[in-house]
Image: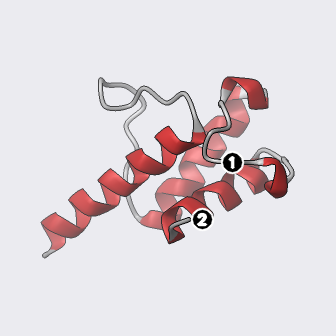
Amino acid sequence: MTEIEEKVLDIVAKECRLDRASLSLDSKIEDLKIESIDLMQTIFQIEEAFDIYVPQEGENFKLTTLRDVTDAVGRLVAEKQGKDA
């Protein structure tokens, strides 16, 4: 698992009060029964941790599983690094 994947799963577990060991990249967000307020707080924490902005809407952000989330964060981090270079 990549550093981004590990960090995102750690944030999700902490902010949503879930057992970290029960989370996998294939976990469906809907199945985790995450409250919308917890999801928003999780997004804020991901933005802060990676110094990125996560758009809430758009074709590139169809987030169904935690893998979708980590892939999206990876793309945003790569885009940011490309702009900073």
Q: Report helix, strand or loop for mark 1.
A: loop
Tell me the residue at 68%/37% (across/down).
27
The quadrant of the image that shows the C terminus is bottom left
Q: Position of residue 4 (x, y in %)?
A: 50, 64
Q: Which residue is mark 2?
A: 7
Tell me the amino acid under the disc marked 2: Lys
> Disc number at residue 24?
1
Q: Position of residue 53 (x, y in %)?
A: 37, 50
Tell me the residue at 72%/38% (across/down).
38
Tell me the amino acid under the disc marked 1: Ser
Crowd band around label 1 with a 10 angstrom C-alpha radius: few (<14), some (14–19), many (20+): some
Find the distance from the CA under tag 2 to the CA under tag 1. 12 Å
Q: If you read the primary sequence from the N terminus, does the residue marked by circle 2 or circle 1 appear first?
A: 2
Labels 2 & 1 near each other (Cβ < 8 A) = no
The quadrant of the image that shows the N terminus is bottom right
Tell me the residue at 16%/66% (across/down).
82
Q: Determine whether 5 is above or below 66 in the image.
A: below
Q: Report helix, strand or loop for mark 2.
A: helix
Tell me the residue at 54%/27% (across/down).
64
Q: Determine whether 4 is above or below 20 in the image.
A: below
Q: Position of residue 63 (x, y in %)?
A: 49, 30
